Image: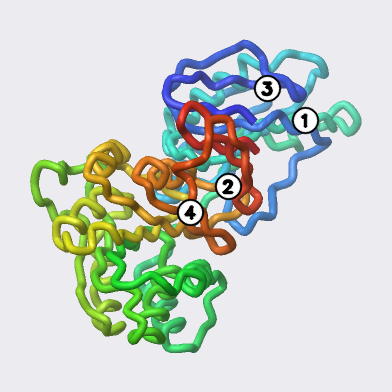
Amino acid sequence: MKNLSLAIAIILSSYYSFSQSQVSIRLRTKIKDTLVIDKYKRIDNGFKIQKLYMAPGNWRIKNETATDLLKSETIIAVDLVYTDYPKGNDFTELNKRRIIELFGALPSAFNRSVVSWRIVKQTGVEKTGGIDKYFHGFVIYYRPMPTNYAENKLIEDIVSGKTKPEDSTLLKVFERNENWKDMLVVCDVTGSMSPYTSQLLLWIKANQKMRSMKNIIFFNDDDEISTAQIKKKDPTGMWKISSGNYRKVMDVAFKAMKEGKHIENNLEAVCRAIDEFPKEKKKVLMIADNWEDPCDMYLVDYLKEKKIPVRIIICGVNSRLNTNYLNIARATGGTVHTMEQDLNNLATIKEGTKFKIGNARILLSRGKFIQIN
């Protein structure tokens, strides 16, 4: 897999090798080598899909209005599907135009570090004929945004014991780290974080005497343009609560979920937290969504300068891991925690080191962590 970031161009592939055709698009995405199959079948990965149709020899999206429905969703993966017919023709330029077309219609398919890309070549047409029976275009895998009602009901059901959490990331991390006391929690309540918010509340409800956490900032910003926390106090997109009563904490979480606009202002929230609760500034614990990038990474240098170690629980990790959170933790002298692992020595990892976090293979390259599979 090739890492594509910032000004690095998209490099189109053909049969497990990358061509030299390039598109100058600023993006952050990853493209796997071409998958060669007879006929395309969707991946059964638990996410929903939206197909964007194109004619076999054309780069225009036929159902472009479908991209409007995807703009508020969290995109997980993109497959560009085409046929090798007539066999042996070079489709590099056509596929390049298709990618540019998608970039214009749906830039969010490119600007998240965890979006997984594949270019899928279908070869069955030569055997079966009927090229119109083969799909051409993009298949967008996405995590649908739940309704506020659905989020609240799930949390209520889990906290009350009516429903068991399908994922136990937070509960397992808290169990492994019972030495955490009076933590300053900075918790993402955007998008599909309700399963993890419910675990936080469940832990507070069941373990009030342990004093694992003292103060909480929930974040769910309403402006993708990050505000200047290092220059002024700005409570936009953040809600605070100092209580060990799970019901009071739940009420504030519900308010944040309802009023925010689902933008990840993670580091702004950390800055607000240490300003509001300076005594706990060395005990910051961020609860973050693996599938979303923080919109305010420029604040890492500020936190590093202030020597604020950021511990991070990453929620929703599977085959892909958002390396932004590894880089935040390494830069600030913090730690990273997933459902299965605690990574406590990120700051001491040497250049060129490779290691695994779950199914994700990670490399430290030029001082930054990247995923290489």
Quadrant of the image occupied by residue 243: bottom left
Amino acid on which disc 2 is placed: Arg
Reading the image, the residue beneath label 1 is 131
Reading the image, the residue beneath label 4 is 344
Q: Nearer the viewer, residue 64 or 256?
A: 256
Using a 10 Å C-alpha cutoff, classify the residue at mark 4 as few (fewer than 14 neighbours), some (14 to 19) or many (20 or more). some
What quarter of the picture does the C terminus occupy? top right
The x, y position of residue 97, in whole percent, is 55, 19
Quadrant of the image occupied by residue 227: top left
The x, y position of residue 63, in whole percent, is 52, 38
Above or below, 20 relative to 47: above
Reading the image, the residue beneath label 2 is 320
Of badges 1 and 3, nearer the viewer stands 3
Of badges 4 and 2, nearer the viewer stands 4
Decide which of tag 2 and tag 1 comes sooner along the chain. 1
Tag 2 near tag 1, CB within 8 Å: no
Find the distance from the CA under tag 2 to the CA under tag 1: 34 Å
Tag 4 near tag 1, CB within 8 Å: no
Amino acid on which disc 3 is placed: Ser
Side of 22 where 281 appears, left or right: left
> How is this picture coloured?
rainbow
Find the distance from the CA under tag 4 to the CA under tag 3: 38 Å
